[in-house]
Image: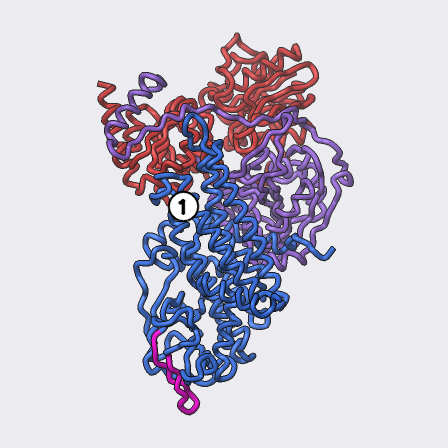
Amino acid sequence: MVLVFIDHDGTKPKKGGLEAVTRAREIAGALNSPVFGLVVGHGIDGVAAEARKYVDTLYVVDNPAFAEYTPEKWTAAAHAAAQKAGAKAVVAPASRTGRTWTARLAVRLDAGLLEDVLEIEPSAEAVVAKRYTFLNRVLETQRAAYPVVVTSKPNAAPLAEPKGDGQVEALAVSLGELEARVEVLEKIQEEKKRVSLTEANVVVTGGRGMGSPEAFKLVEELADLLGGAVGATRAVVDAGWRPYAEQVGQTGKTVQPALYIALGVSGAVQHQAGMNKSKVVVAVNKDPDAPIFKETDYGIVGDVHQVLPAMIEAVKKLKD
Amino acid sequence: MKFVAIIRQVPDGEAKLREEGGRIDLSGATMILDQMDEYAVEEIIQLKEKHGGEAVIVAFGPERTKEAIRTALAMGADRAVFVKYEGDADPITEAKALAQVLKEEAPTVVFTGGQQADWDSYALGPAVAEALGWPSVAWTTAFELADETQATAQHDLDEGAQRVQVKLPAVFTTQQGLNEPRYPTLPGIMKAKKKEIKEIPAEELGITGTRVEILSQAIVKIERKQKILDGTKEPEKAAEELVRLLHEEAKVI
Amino acid sequence: MALDFNLTEEQEELRKLARRFAREQVAPLAKEYDEKEEVPWPLVEKLFEIGLLNVSIPEENGGLGLGLVEEVIIGEELGWADMGFFTIPMASELGITPVLLAGNAEQKERFLRPLTERPALAAFALSEPGNGSDAAALKTRAERVGDHYVLNGTKMWISNAAEADWTVVFATFNPELRHKGVVALVVEREREGVSFNKIHGKMGQRAAPTYEVVLEDVRVPVENRLGEEGEGFKIAMLTLDKTRIPVAAGSVGVARRALEEAAKYAKEREAFGRPIIDFQAIQFKLADMMIGLETARMYTLYAAWLADRGDPRHIYASAIAKAYASEIAFDAANEAIQIHGGYGYVNDFPVEKLLRDVKLNQIYEGTNEIQRVIVARHIKKNIP
């Protein structure tokens, strides 16, 4: 049996959840088993109605105690669902939270953990998975015998298509002393004006070379013209020029857009770890020796303060 | 109170990786204390400085891991417990071994890196917590110890963040912004020589193999076109040419 | 089996710390401070925090009591990042060394301990406007008046001076006695009659501050005299016999940087359809750089090892190390520019700075000509 955790935004399944369904179906194919789904939250009838279309049976944990995420509660819910389904494999999206509670679940199920997988090759005995390691610089093939817990890398799997109406079952989860030990005091929302960084097709990132927070007006202008998101390097975030939510890199977000434009970004390895799988990389930097140029398809050696306004004009002209 | 940081030794991000027979060969790479673990070491030293008690390093890995342990001791930790294990490991396997050590150490708070720079994994911290039956907080950006039984923390979610109150003992994983890790000092290096590193063979903890097997590793190299234009003299022209290439050749705008 | 090229575990740790500090803290600011011609005090403060400033001060005076081998390890790393920056702690050790060699217990405690308690520097003033290498021909006068000396004269090319808590000033109480008429006095920065003029327009090492020190009726108490009257010249020479070893270490650092930069560029830069490192003309240059680097590093460590053991051979060994390392480093920097072509000649790349900086290593703490005089003196005396 295979269990898939479908995450959601409160009203419908998220993209990551539907990608996880795709991986769950692949494993179910190898095991010749049905797919069980799990949705967790409070007041999520709408989510359940949508999510059931992707699975044979959907467990719903809908309970005020699950209004706010904690890894302990999510693990408890997934564990209860896995037990009930008799799951040999559990799949979840490799979001930051997904990769946290699944680690707990793997220990609880004594399962092998295949994290952030790009693709999988399941058999009746084991799952072989490909994933990036060493700060995104190495492609690693891993194998884990069942039971396994798999998290699916964002944007790596095709979105699952709905296929009928699965059975919906409310699942009771008993919470013990462990789950009571974390209390959520406050949820802090991220300010969001544009498309989310991880989902954007175009990312325009400014680095230290922009020179000042004011210079990011032009970065924003180019991003808006291209319908993209604004990114920032760690140096820029540390300097307080841009919010952390925009940081691309090892400790920030990992992006894989069709077009990545790096402006005044030198391109430290930690930054590259967050963007080096982008399809087309563009860089503008006055230092011809900047490491970013090694990861660049199209670049300009020059002063970003002269080049960027000219790029904006050229894009505008193109659009007319 | 006792504060523990779990650390790993990983290749320096700037180090060139080498591939040998379908595996990554680290023998020539510069190895360092994982930078995400540095935040953990800094945090427990600060906790010790503020609240008293002991700052203990717990590490897992091959013999060379001792270099990273020495760095952590030179930063100011008091002593270390080192579970020695040669060969591949995975975070779940490591967590099970370390849980046995931590049960005995009985710390108030455990910190470890939010991500390991070799495994690119987020799992170690929460897996250790699970193996101990303790709560875990991932990607911690702020931490405040109330007393021996309670702490508050702020940590990153997928989008946005949470502030939580946690009953201790608990495991916290680090995120950039938690603190500013100090350098080891030269006097610290000299003192570290005399600090205890208790070595435990992994077999003694029942660890003989790894749950997840590595079949192969290959360095990823995306071939880039490397069309670099000179924009030092005529920036407008270079910009126009760039936009034309992106439109006509790459077809991305 | 006594020959052993291994560093101790602590020395390896020290190298790692110095390398990390050099790479993360010093190198990124090297260009900026060179352009601004400004003392990087924030870096000096950080160097102090991690314990790498004034490392030779003995433990009983609050220091770490490290030897020259350790200074050489630190010197290569800091020299790699910015030779100009390295000159600041190096010149401070130059000021500390005469106190170590000739100071009494009270003086060591009074002058050295404060340098371990906060980021602070020392300095050494021997050269004068009219005499550099002929160190015995001092013009600066020290006239004994009761329990004081009264200093008058001008000292030239003094590293750190105005930045330093105190400077060891060498002066003559009787010029006719030549080198037997020299006295070494510790002169605190705040003493009345001491003034400093910063020297501008230096070709390189522009982060390191260099001063002219003017002494006008400066009263210095006898308690500040190192050793006896007449021992000053000996103290200065004994000092330089040791302190030119770190100059060699800094040169080794510059040579390593030059090789690394040149190799990196040669692998990336293409000509006639292949990376230029494939051409023998480039390969020979790089190989020569490596030959120089490896031999200079080994010999510098050897000289430091001799000095730490109190072996008198360090006198000529330090001279060989200083002259040799600074020359191979100059050549390495020069060839690194050549390999870079036109790019090597502009400051977008770090190699032109290496050449400007390392030129000074052939000049200060005894020109390379003076080093050869020292070596020749040894040959005359000891080689049959």
Q: Is residue A127 magenta?
A: no
Q: Residue at x 50, y 33 (%)?
A: A68
Q: Is residue C350 left or right of residue C251?
A: left
Q: Position of residue C28 (x, y in %)?
A: 41, 47
Q: Colour of chain A?
A: red
Give, as a three-letter code, the residue at label 1. Val
Q: Is residue A298 above or below residue C123?
A: above
For the residue labelled by badge 1, is the local secondary structure a helix, a strand or a loop? Answer: helix
Q: Residue at x 28, y 38 (%)?
A: A215
Q: Is residue C333 left or right of residue A210?
A: right
Residue B157 seen in this snapshot:
no
Q: Colour of chain B?
A: purple
Q: Give the total of numbered labels.
A: 1
User: Magenta part of the protein: which range?
Assistant: C140-154
Image-quadrant location for residue A141: top right
Which residue is more in the foreground, C240 or A102? C240
Dot 1, crowdedness within 10 Å: few (<14), some or many (≥20)?
many
Question: Which quarter of the rendered picture does the N terminus of chain C lie within?
Answer: bottom right
Q: Colour of chain C?
A: blue
Q: Position of residue A318 (x, y in %)?
A: 24, 19
Which residue is more in the foreground, C151 or A255? C151
Q: Is residue B44 above or below residue C200?
A: above
